[in-house]
Structures are given as C-alpha cells and as structure tokens.
Amino acid sequence: NLAPKLVSLYDSSEIPQESKYEILLALGNLKYSDAVKLYKKIIERDEASGKVERMYACAALGKLQGEEALSVLVKAFGQKDPNVRGAAVQAMAEIGTKDTFTYLILALRDSHVIPRLAAVEAAGKLKLEEAIPYLEYQFRQDPEKKVKEAAIVALGKIGTAQCKTILESNIENDKIPDTYRVLLFFVLTESMGAEVTKDSPALAFFIKTMNNKDRTVFNDLVRKIAASSSLNFVPYITMLLEDKDFTVRLSALYWIERNKVVSFLDKVKVLAESDTVENVRKKALAVLEGLQTK
C-alpha cells in the first residue's frame, strides 16, 4: 500500500523537489514494478531539463532491475547528458545481467569521462572478463588519470591470469610514470595476492625504489603499506624492519602492532634490544608486549 501512495505523493505539486528524489529511490528499494512507468516518463522528458531527476530515476531502476527497467535504462544510456549516461551505466552494473554487458562495453568508449569511468568501475565490480582488452587500453591510452587508475583497480578485481600478466608487464615498464606503478604494486600485492618470489615484478619494483638515491617513491610505498591491513605485505614488512632509515623501521612496527602478526615476534625482539635509535627500541618494546599478550 505504501508504494502507490508514494507515486501519488510524487505527483503532488506541494512536494519539494528534493523529496521527490527520495521518493524515486524509495520506490526502487521497494521493488515496485509499476514505478517503471513513472521512471520511463521521467527519462523521456525534454533532455534540456530535469537532469538530476533522470539520474535518480536511473539509480532507482538499478534497484528495481528486470527487463522493463533495463529497457528504460537503455533509453537513458542514449541521451546527450553525460551525467545521465553515467547514472545509467551505474544502474546497469547493479542489474549485472548478461544483457547489460554490451552497453557497459560501449560505455568504455564513451567520449565523456563520467560514463567511461562508471563503465570501468562496473567492469571491475562485475568481474567482466570481456572488458579486459578495453581496460588495458584505458590504462595505456585514456587521457584522464582517474580512468587510468580505475582501470588498474578493475583489472585487479577481475583477477584472471591475463589481468596479472597485463599488470606485471606494466609495472616492469620504466616508461610508465611511478604514480601508476605504485598503484600497480598495490593491486598486484593487496588485491591479487601475487606471490613474492625472486622473479616477482612487484618485488623488483619495490627493491628498485628502495635502492634509489631519491627515495620519494619508496617513502610513498612505505606510507601506503603501513596503512594497509593486508597480510600479503608480510614479506615486505620483513624488509622494512631492516631498512637503514629508522622512520621506515618505525612504520613497519606500527603495521605489525595494528595487524598483530605474531610471526614477527623474534624480529621485533631484536629491534627492542639492539636498534641504534632509541625511539625504535621503545616502539619495538611496546609492540613486543602487545604480541606476547595476544
């Protein structure tokens, strides 16, 4: 009974526009199939007005799902406003059926960054293997930094052997800017759990940055590793504990303390007893006490 009342309320001229947006979402959350007619009416209005309303209608259609909802989203996907197209792509990702895949692939080639970014993120969310060649292209050729970065993350989420090969070949490429190679390192290690071996491209990149005279990139890696809760970084924490820079050793200790990895107990004990820097010894002692009481 609530849904029909909301539809009537939506048509009331006394309701503020912001409340109408909430009604559109509520009808989608209620899975009220008859609301498709309302959403279709909104999408088919004059494109010169009501952009935000059409975006809310798309979001609701994604929650509603079904063939009728998708057919209305296809209409939204074909509109001129990139915000509406982007909202349609996000909604199609919510539906996530094979019928949506064609449109998501098309959106990867959209001329505007908004639907393109939405499509890249959708491909990762749905683990859309059909999108892998396009995502590789987005990373290498897209003019927008945020689309490039989203493509790397999406490849990590899809996580196939092909994705791993693409990511590893790029982290090995010295022509790729370090800002992307840092992200490649984290996607390979944190998201994909790439094995750390002597031939690991991620490990080679890490060691290279560690040995560089300019340690700007390495310090960025250290900060991000220290903030992570992934146990995939255990091999790297081992190396950080032995680094010449005491601030790096401290970062490793903070990681161990937060993640409570007892396998580091012996190494932490050595630092507590013999590190050359008092702050490191004190921190190691505190971490050691925490590990022993776990």
Image (cartoon, rainbow, N blue to C red):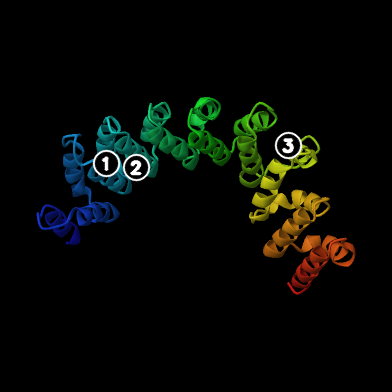
| Residue 84 drawn above or below residue 280 | above
Q: Quadrant of the N terminus?
A: bottom left
Q: Residue furthest bottom?
A: 293
245, 127: nearer the viewer:
245
x and y percent of residue 57 in the render? Answer: 25, 45
x and y percent of residue 47 in the render? Answer: 20, 34
Q: Please give the residue where the numbered disc 3 appears in the rendered image.
A: 205
Label 2 or label 3, whichever lies nearer to me, is: 3
Q: Please give the residue where the numbered disc 2 appears in the rendered image.
A: 91
- Amino acid type at image mark 1: Ala
Upstream in sequence: badge 2 or badge 1: 1
Determine the image quadrant of residue 114.
top left
- Amino acid type at image mark 3: Phe
Q: Residue at x 39, y 38 (%)?
A: 97
- Amino acid type at image mark 2: Ala
Q: Residue furthest front?
A: 214
